[in-house]
Amino acid sequence: MKTLIKNIKELIQVRENNVSKLSGKQMSTLPTISNAWLLIKDDIIEDYGKMESLPSLKEVTVIDAAGKTVLPSWIDSHTHLVYAGNREQEFVDRIKGLSYEEIAAKGGGIINSTAKLQQASEDQLFEQASIRLEQVIKMGTGAIEIKSGYGLTTEAELKMLRVAKRLQKHYPITIKTTFLGAHAVPKEFQANKKEYVNEVCNVMLPKIAEENLADYIDIFCEKGYFDLEDTKQVLEAGKKYGIRGKIHVNQFNAIGGVQLGVDYDVLSVDHLEVMKEEDIDALKNTNTMPVGLPSCSLYIDIPYAPTRKMIDAGLPVALATDYNPGSSPNGNMNLVISLACIKMGMTPEEAINASTINAAYAMGIEKTHGSITKGKKANLIITDAIPSYGFLPYSFGNNHISQVILAGKIVE
Ligand code: NIG
Ligand code: FE
């Protein structure tokens, strides 16, 4: 089956297939073909070019994209999309003056979601997560990473990851899963955190590896959660099973998690709201992608990751939503891109590169996703008629997506 998209005003993020990630300097350009066509065969981008050179094609479905921009789908490399219920009460608590950390200290936060998740059945979780997933697909996300981390028992962590895997069977979006057993210390282990970390590494992880439920392993490396020693233990355990790290670091405090992550060659270090000079230096010339999560900064009112500084230092940067019930109950990559421009000093080109090709790298799917490249997955966004791609972040909070194509098919 072939589909031709013709009369495209701007076809953006057109790259050769040897590009795996963009350095800070390379992020400033966004290769574009104006007045273009693009041909899809089955679920793959077969070819593209300028309208002047459109070959004659028979038996194709034609989409006329006159006045519209076509780009690769957004890639959301950091989410906690599978969760139960919500934390609306904590939202009100914060309005009344409590901080995210104060709410956690009085039994709210991650532990609040854990209680809800443990009570929910796999089917209930699947239903709730499906609604969120359908929403993010409509907003242009074509690949998403989903973490566990609200179960905090073997049974409940497995349940979360099974739901994420089930979502992959039901939806055309690409999904990668991450085991985040070390997200918070459950109540039963408050007096003995070490025992919980042992449980994560020696009981949960072997089962998860056996059922092949996780592509990556994560830990919340932060004061009051898990320290460097715990992080080392978890990354070491992951290594034993060939599961690479993608870790939460430097959200509230810089305690050396970035350096440790780099030492373990983790795929990404995420959050980075609080960065020391040595954290930026540690990331230079490594395989580790720094990931900023601006909607979390907006929502819980904490600093934004200094991505401008990082890009100026030559580092690649990716962006993601951190979609979760506590610190970012929102999975809208369009908003993330706008926030990156408005609050983090990133240009539209940088923000779009950070949400496509560099985000694909942060999910380990850069060979098949994240750019308009022959042979890559036909996961595409067709905008409505906009003056240029820069209008997307400029016109923040508005929806300019008219159609979404996943695995070569229009999503209805
Ligand atoms: O990435 N920081 C740790 N974990 C999540 C928040 C989880 C929650 O509050 O439920 C995050 O922000
Ligand atoms: Fe997170």
Image (cartoon, grey):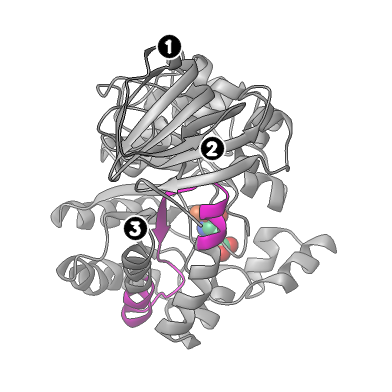
The mark found on residue 52 in the picture is 1
Q: Which residues are magenta?
A: 134-160
Give residue 42's position: percent from left, percent from top: 27, 45
The residue most toward the right is: 96
Q: Quadrant of the N terminus?
A: top left
- Residue at x 25%, y 32% (from the top left corner): 375
Viewed as shown, does residue 56 lie left or right of 191?
left
The residue under the point 55% across, 21% down is 349
Give the number of the mark in front: 3 or 1.
1
**The residue under label 1 is which amino acid type?**
Glu
Disc number lying in front (2 or 1)? 1
> Does residue 163 show up magenta in the picture?
no
Q: Amino acid at mark 2?
A: Ile
Look at the picture and state if 44 lies above or below 101: above
CA distance for labels 2 and 3: 30 Å
Q: Nearer the viewer, residue 220 or 372?
A: 372
Q: Position of residue 217 (x, y in %)?
A: 31, 55
Q: Which one is nearer the viewer's eye here, 372 or 193?
A: 372
Whether residue 355 is visible to the viewer of this picture, yes or no, is: yes
Q: Amino acid at mark 3?
A: Thr
Q: Residue at x 52, y 33 (%)?
A: 64
175 or 12: which is nearer to us? 12
**Looking at the image, can residue 83 be seen?**
no
Asked if the residue at label 3 sits under 8 Å from ligand 2, the reply is no
Q: Where residue 135 sits in the image (x, y, percent)? A: 57, 59
Residue wearing tag 2: 382
Mark 3 highlights which residue? 178
- Relative to 92, is 350 above or below? above
